[in-house]
Image (cartoon, rainbow, N blue to C red):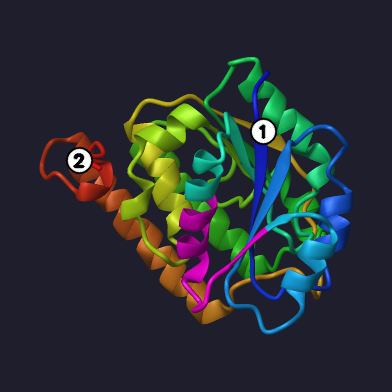
């Protein structure tokens, strides 16, 4: 039997946490770990009422810093597969069995839930036009640079095998939103198999989303990370992000 742990990097998720948890089909995950990044609402109280394993950061560590705690705890608690589910209800957690299933059956090492199937669906689901355009541009650049053909590089609905999390040096990644792009680039650099399934686009007033200016910083950071990947691939430099763990 494989142990499946869902991790939820949470910040002010009080209004959306319960429906996100309720939508996870029964029996799919063995444990749900919620890491609260010093929320200002009652996210922690709701998580405890729902029976989740709760860890609180005394100070806000950022989106990437939150994920680092999530993955460290999941590995410490014996996870064979770790699925990240944002507790903001933007991603449909009812699809968790499909991400987990491809990993359990060893078809892939990493699974992504892609929000980009068609332009009309993405925009109809509420994705802002500027975010759609940026998503397409950054995904194109990442695919060309890595030789991949993923439909989206920027989804927050992901699942990893234990081997992936024990191999790639995700501890060296950014504590901000660039963490996600860096982690996928590491998965490519280390030769892991990446699969994806389509998931509905669900933007709403309570879903977390970075603003325009932080989106610009995210885009620039992602391009910088892709540049580091290319330097590594062509042996022009040895960025620590792509060096094997020594800890």
The answer to whether any part of residue 203 appears in the image is no
Percent x, y for residue 57? 53, 71
- In-image side of 165 versus 37 (left or right): left
Q: In which quarter of the image is residue 17?
A: bottom right
- In-image side of 244 versus 168 (left or right): left
Foreground residue, 102 or 76?
Answer: 76
In the image as oriented, which residue stretches furthest toward the left?
Answer: 236
The disc at residue 232 is: 2
Where, quadrant-wise, is the C terminus in this rendering? top left
Question: Residue at horizontal 76%, vertical 37%?
Answer: 96
Q: Is mark 2 on a helix, strand or loop?
A: helix
Seen in the picture, residue 70 relative to 96 is either above or below; the reply is below
Q: Give the range drawn in magenta.
A: 54-70
Percent x, y for residue 170? 38, 48
Foreground residue, 160 or 207?
Answer: 160
Chain-order first, disc 1 or disc 2: 1
Question: Residue at horizontal 56%, vertical 56%?
Answer: 135
Q: Badge 1 local density, few (<14 within 10 Å), some, or many (20+)? A: many
Seen in the picture, residue 148 relative to 184 is either above or below; the reply is above
Q: Mark 1 points at which residue?
A: 4
- In-image side of 57 versus 129 (left or right): left
The answer to whether any part of residue 112 appears in the image is yes
Question: Residue at horizontal 31%, vertical 54%?
Answer: 172
Percent x, y for residue 33? 66, 52
Instruction: Calculate the distance from the C-alpha at mark 1 to the C-alpha at mark 2.
Output: 33 Å
Question: Residue at horizontal 37%, vertical 66%?
Answer: 220
Q: Badge 2 local density, few (<14 within 10 Å), some, or many (20+)? A: some
Percent x, y for residue 183? 42, 46
* Total numbered badges shown on the rendered structure: 2
| Residue 65 among magenta residues | yes
């Amino acid at each position: 039997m494989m142990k499946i742990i869902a991790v939820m990097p949470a910040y002010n998720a009080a209004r959306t946490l319960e429906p996100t948890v309720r939508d996870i089909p029964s029996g799919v995950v063995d444990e749900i770990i919620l890491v609260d990044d010093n929320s200002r609402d009652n996210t922690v109280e709701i998580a405890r009422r729902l029976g989740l394993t709760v860890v609180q950061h005394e100070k806000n560590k950022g989106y990437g810093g939150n994920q680092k705690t999530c993955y460290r705890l999941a590995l410490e608690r014996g996870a064979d597969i770790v699925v990240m589910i944002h507790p903001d209800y933007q991603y449909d957690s009812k699809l968790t069995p499909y991400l987990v299933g491809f990993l359990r059956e060893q078809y892939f090492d990493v699974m992504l839930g892609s929000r980009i199937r068609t332009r009309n669906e993405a925009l109809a689901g509420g994705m802002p036009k500027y975010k759609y355009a940026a998503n397409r541009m950054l995904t194109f650049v990442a695919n060309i640079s890595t030789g991949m053909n993923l439909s989206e590089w920027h989804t927050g609905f992901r699942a990893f095998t234990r081997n992936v999390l024990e191999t790639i040096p995700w501890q060296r990644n950014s504590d901000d939103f660039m963490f996600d792009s860096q982690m996928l680039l590491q998965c490519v650099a280390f030769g892991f198999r990446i699969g994806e399934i389509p998931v509905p686009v669900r933007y709403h007033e309570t879903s977390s989303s970075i603003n325009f200016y932080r989106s610009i910083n995210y885009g620039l950071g992602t391009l910088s990370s892709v540049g580091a990947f290319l330097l590594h691939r062509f042996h022009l430099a040895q960025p620590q992000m792509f060096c094997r763990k020594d800890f």
